[in-house]
């Protein structure tokens, strides 16, 4: 049961926190600064569906997503049915856990939803930067704080925005990140309805109800025959189609290095 | 109370007293001669949306709740800060104003320090940047996996809240922890984002299952010590 019920209408946030929306340019600038500070290891390529790490994984590292889209997924021990995605990581954002921090097993897995390029952030270099200080040290602290603030703000949205608004925002965010278009020009969503419902913290049935309501309000138009969903938003008309480019891989794939591009 | 009904307090990741003690010692080593020490009773508001961002706080004892107030007046619980943890520095670091409120949950002692000192220390290199990053990473991890408001039901969140508060209290030899949380039920319900009625129902359920006991007249909560762990929250 969800106890943090979303209010029926959005409440205005009095927050003065300046969380800038994700943009490609900002993500590129952030990644370039990580490079500039020489804190990244070699890039690793993960095909769609690959696990970057699994729960309890020995591989303890902090990662920076360079290209693609990564989902964090957790399985509730008590309720196996709640195995669910709970967060997305966009390019320029960090995920995982550095080996320098308390030895608590990571209870979730990170999955590449589409072909992704990820940098492991070297713990040794990270620690060196912090110990030496200067602009590199301040940059690391700043990145942590920025990622944390974004994560907290996202968690807070559950209480401040209703589910329909969060669904619309999720689609808008995905439209910004996913630049691969199908032959018909649609944005390929590598997420099932079940995954999107899980990211929103609702059941797939509740998501169906929301979609029906949006369709009756002429905000979206779903064509199951064409596997398409067209959404009208402030950003224009967006056309989505669901793509399932992968089946979950059983084993951690061997990462291969590719040149940075 | 049966063993399978107990919360495994000392094996739970939230229950890491030694680590907190070490972090407090590390911070105190850095700031022992700096700032001012403030003692506060439960319920004292230390930081609000109108506070200046040029100060941050180190918790030396007690527990501080960080909350966010919406325009409707509804309060959203964000995090708890325990001894060895800092709060209030984000606004200065990221160049925006204060966007949270902080109030003491228990009798607490905090050290009020300059945010600019923190930035200067990080630039200078050494321990401050490492301590700050560790806390941020831990928070990031908890924001992702532990304080999961979407997938945890309110009962689990209440257990988690109590476990966090419990780290400021000493367990008795049997491992049981008795917490005096001098907050009203409606206040804790507000922190957890649920109604007072839901909170009462959850308390009854947890008590029935011997997961937590509550003695409202003393505002005391009892968390059983670990035995065979119930696979918990």
Image (tube, coloured by chain):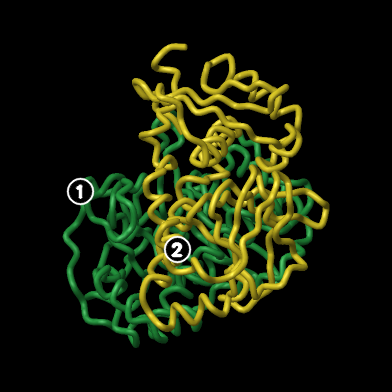
Chain colours: A green, B yellow
Q: Residue under label 2, please give it.
A: B27
User: Could you tell me which residue is drawn at 34 percent across and 48 percent down?
Assistant: A106
Identify the subunit bearing mark 1: A
Percent across and percent down for residue B157 are 57, 37
Identify the subunit bearing mark 2: B
In this rendering, the label closer to the viewer, 1 or 2: 2
Q: Residue furthest right?
A: B72
Nearer to us in this view, B107 or A59: B107
Q: Viewed as shown, does residue B71 lie left or right of B15? A: right
Nearer to us in this view, B63 or B28: B28
SS state under label 2: helix
Nearer to us in this view, A13 or B162: B162
Residue B123 visible (yes or no): yes
SS state under label 1: loop
Q: Residue furthest top?
A: B1
User: Could you tell me which residue is drawn at 65 percent across and 48 percent down?
Assistant: B77
Percent across and percent down for residue A150 are 55, 65
Q: Residue under label 1, please give it.
A: A251
**Where B216 sits versus B140, above or below?**
above
Percent across and percent down for residue A181 are 45, 71
Q: Viewed as shown, does residue B191 lie left or right of B58? A: right
Location of the C terminus of chain A by quadrant is: bottom left
Residue A235 visible (yes or no): no
Do dots 1 and 2 share one subunit?
no
**Where B106 sits versus B113, above or below?**
above
- Measured in 3D between alpha carbons, the distance from the residue under mark 1 to the one under mark 2, in whole angstroms, is 42 Å
User: Could you tell me which residue is drawn at 47 percent across and 23 percent down?
Assistant: B224
């Amino acid at each position: 049961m969800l106890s943090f019920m979303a209010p029926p209408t959005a409440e205005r946030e009095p927050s003065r926190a300046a969380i800038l929306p994700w943009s490609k340019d900002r993500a590129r600038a952030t990644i370039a600064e990580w490079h500039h500070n020489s804190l990244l290891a070699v890039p690793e390529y993960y095909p769609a569906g690959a696990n970057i790490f699994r729960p309890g994984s020995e591989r303890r590292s902090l990662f920076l997503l360079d290209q693609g889209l990564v989902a964090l997924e957790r399985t509730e021990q008590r309720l196996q049915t709640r195995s669910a995605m709970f967060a997305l990581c966009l390019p320029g954002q960090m995920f995982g856990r550095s080996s320098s921090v308390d030895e608590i097993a990571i209870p979730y897995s990170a999955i590449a939803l589409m072909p992704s390029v990820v940098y492991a952030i070297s713990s040794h270099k990270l620690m060196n930067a912090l110990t030496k200080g200067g602009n590199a040290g301040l940059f690391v602290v700043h990145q942590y704080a920025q990622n944390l603030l974004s994560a907290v703000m996202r968690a807070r949205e559950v209480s401040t925005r209703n589910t329909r608004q969060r669904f619309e925002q999720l689609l808008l965010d995905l439209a910004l990140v996913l630049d691969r278009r199908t032959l018909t020009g649609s944005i390929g969503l590598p997420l099932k309805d079940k995954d999107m419902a899980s990211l929103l913290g609702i059941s797939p049935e509740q998501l169906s109800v929301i979609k029906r309501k949006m369709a009756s309000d002429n905000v979206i138009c779903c064509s199951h025959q064409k596997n398409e969903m067209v959404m009208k938003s402030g950003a224009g008309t967006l056309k989505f189609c669901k793509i399932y480019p992968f089946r979950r891989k059983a084993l951690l794939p061997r990462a291969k290095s590719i040149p940075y591009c | 109370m049966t063993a399978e009904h107990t919360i495994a307090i000392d094996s739970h990741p939230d229950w890491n007293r030694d680590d907190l003690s070490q972090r407090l010692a590390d911070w105190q080593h850095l700031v022992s001669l700096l700032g001012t020490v403030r003692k506060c009773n439960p319920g004292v508001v230390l930081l609000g949306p109108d506070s200046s961002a040029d100060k941050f706080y180190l918790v030396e004892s007690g527990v501080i709740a960080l909350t966010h107030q919406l325009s409707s007046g509804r309060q959203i619980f964000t995090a708890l800060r325990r001894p060895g943890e800092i709060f209030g520095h984000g606004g200065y670091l990221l160049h925006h104003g204060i966007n949270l409120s902080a109030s003491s949950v228990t009798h607490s002692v905090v050290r009020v320090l300059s945010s600019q000192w923190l930035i200067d220390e990080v630039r200078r290199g050494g321990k401050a940047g490492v301590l700050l990053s560790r806390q941020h990473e831990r928070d990031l991890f908890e924001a992702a996996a532990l304080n999961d408001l979407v997938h945890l039901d309110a009962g689990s969140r209440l257990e988690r809240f109590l476990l966090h508060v419990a780290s400021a209290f000493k367990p008795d030899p049997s491992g049981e922890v008795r917490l005096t949380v001098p907050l009203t039920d409606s206040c804790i319900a507000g922190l957890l984002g649920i109604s007072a009625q839901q909170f009462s129902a959850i308390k009854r359920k947890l008590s029935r299952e011997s997961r937590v006991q509550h003695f409202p007249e003393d505002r005391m909560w009892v968390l059983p010590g670990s035995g065979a762990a119930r696979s918990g929250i």
